[in-house]
Amino acid sequence: MIKGFIFDLDGVITDTAELHYKAWKNLADEMGWDFDYEINDKLRGISRMDSIKVILDHNQASLDEETLAELATKKNDIYVSSLDEMTSEDYLPGAKELLTHLRTEGFNVALGSASKNAIKVLQQLNANMYFDVIGDGNSVSKSKPEPDIFLYGSEKMKLQPDECIVFEDAESGIDAAKAGGFYSVGIGPKERVGHADLRFDSMAEATLFEIKSHFKDLF
């Protein structure tokens, strides 16, 4: 039986993708690197350090680990300062409604995000009330596609992976859910999250009714 839900943050609860893009673009321009939306899409769901390595590979550049860490921190500072612009109006359509229904029906809910700024984002959204457990980039050492962040969430909720449904918008996130033995709901295009157990184009379509209808034997 499904007793818990685990949500990624960016692209599922809210969309900070444009803020991330602007921060990376700012850094790339300063370094003289090529960076556009196509490269940015490859950063979906992966850590900050992995992201900067993708950008480096694309530009056939190399830097020592210390410099990489400094640049990743610089990008993060740009991004974090932009988070002050976020408000409780910045949920993706359908996300707040789903979280509210899960609360009403008494399900356990965890956040499973690679972001180290997840707590700040939740505060800006006024969303803490919807989550029993916060799993973020500070909670585990191995990021997606490793399942550690989702396993952290299920363990803290005292649930088994097969008692939880993971919501993800990244290919690496669905891979992580599958690796951990979780049921999965993909948010986004088929070519990216089509390997999830259930897929929606957007969170607006991902109602609790639709989820229960698909996983009817588990409720």
Image: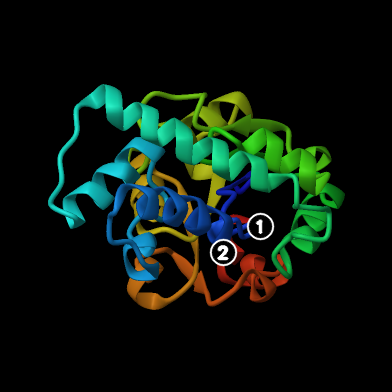
Relative to the observer, which residue lies in front, 167 or 3?
167
Question: Would you say 207 lies left or right of 195 here?
Answer: right
Q: How many marks?
A: 2
Residue 14 numbered mark, or none: 1
Classify residue 136 by image quadrant.
Answer: top right
Looking at the rendered structure, which numbered label has been put on residue 215? 2
Query: Circles 2 and 1: CB distance less than 8 Å?
Result: no
Q: In this picture, is 95 found above or below 138?
A: below
- Residue 29 in view, yes or no: yes
Instruction: Identify the residue at horizontal 57%, vertical 44% (top origin).
Output: 79
State the SS at label 2. Answer: loop
Classify 45 as above or below 141. Answer: below
| N-terminal label among 2 and 1 | 1
Q: Is residue 129 above or below residue 105?
A: above
Give coordinates of residue 62: x percent, y percent.
15, 39
- Amino acid carrying label 1: it is Thr
Q: Position of residue 192 (x, y in %)?
A: 36, 69
Name the mark on residue 138: none
Q: Label 1, secondary structure: give it.
A: loop
In space, the residues marked 2 and 1 are separated at their CA atoms by 25 Å
Q: Amino acid at mark 2?
A: Phe
Disc 2 crowd, CA 10 A, few/some/many (<14, 14-19, 20+): some
